Image (cartoon, grey):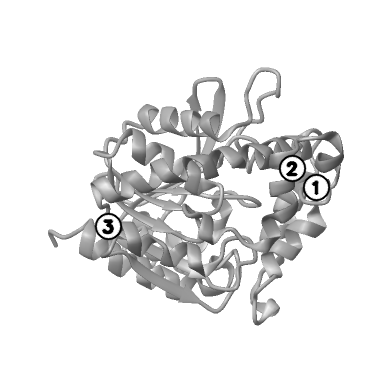
Amino acid sequence: MVSSTSALPASASSATQIHYRYKQAGDVNVFYREAGDSTAPVLLMLHGFAGSSFMFRELFSQLADRYHLIAPDLPAFGFTGVPEKGSYAYTFDQLAETIDRFTEELNLDAYALMVHDYGAPVGWRLAAAHPERVTAIISQNGNAYEEGLGEAWAPIQRYWREPTPENRKALQEFPTPASIKWQYLEGVTDPSLVSPDGYTLEGIQVSQPGNAEIQLDLLLDYAANVDKYPAFQRYFREYQPPLLAVWGKNDPFFLAEGAKAWKRDLPKAEIKFYDTGHFALETHATEIGMDIRDFLDRHVRTSD
């Protein structure tokens, strides 16, 4: 009897085969998922909170036949190592430095960026530091404009203004399994489309000893990203990278106005909205995958 996998053409099965690997980047052992032909154009995929490279799982099957997909877990997320707080600064500058080192260890001298949530300010730092490397940008609810900050940020912004123990304590429910589940389901019109795998796995991760405190440190440092928004916007204006925004329009954290704002700096930006929440890939991966494939085929892989 011939198995179903052996009946597949070798090229088809190998092109979409996902590999699970680690790469040392400075003091951090970075876990990443990889698929696709190593000679194909690279798509570097950066997740956000509360996520990991697992969030891109359905895109791998849609894009790996034409693109070289690389999706690392950020430090303290997924399967990447969690350096002790005393030896590693949990700031977005440091996360970007680690991922920059990761790309250099993999010899990635050109790549399209796909970012979500926290992955956005990490990606914006990479793009601003190495504009010649970035061939295109895809943002799935990854913000770069103050107009995109929703009311859900109000208690976090209070902590930015007054980083007191009391204001930190007021956010202690943010990095919890219950809060993460809410973030996955809020704004979703049909919750039955959201697999429990994602929010359950991330709930387990945030429950690991010390992880909640790391997440609160990153929440505090997110203010530095807002301070850098003008610099990121200058990058967009100066270099005019092709940009596709694929946005869950019901996101309580990053509003649709944040996606629309790109038109000021990137008049040719393509902005698409979907009737879902912050984790749009959980409910609309097929549609978003098709839009990403079309975008990349037009702007990155144009020779065939």
Q: CA distance from mark 2 to mark 1?
A: 8 Å
Q: Is residue 10 visible?
A: no
Q: Nearer the viewer, residue 275 or 45?
A: 275
Q: Earlier in the sequence, mark 3 or mark 1?
A: 1
Q: Which residue is mark 3?
A: 242
Judge depth for marks 3 and 1 and give the one in front.
1
Indicate the amino acid at tag 2: Tyr
Mark 2 and mark 1 residues within 8 Å of each other at the beta carbon: yes
**Would residue 62 be seen by someone viewing this image from the given angle?**
yes
Counting from the top left corner in percent of width and height, residue 89 is at: 62, 25
- As shown in the figure, which amino acid type bears the numbered disc 3? Pro
Query: In the rendering, which numbered label is found on residue 171?
Result: 1
Q: Would you place residue 24 above or below residue 123 in this image?
A: above
Q: Position of residue 125 (x, y in %)?
A: 42, 38
**Within 10 Å of the Cα at label 1, are there few (<14), some (14-19), or many (20+) other Cα atoms?**
some
Foreground disc of the pair 2, 3: 2
- How much space separates mark 2 and mark 3, taking CA atoms? 35 Å
Can you name the residue that lies furthest to the front here? 161
Q: Is residue 185 left or right of residue 304?
A: right
User: Sequence-wise, which precedes: disc 2 or disc 3?
Assistant: 2
**What label does residue 159 carry, if any?**
2
* Residue at the (78%, 58%) spot, across then down: 179
Q: Are marks 3 and 1 in contact (CB under 8 Å)?
A: no
Residue lying at 59% horizontally and 49% vertically, measured from the top left: 52
Compare residues 217 and 9 and report the one nearer the observer.
217
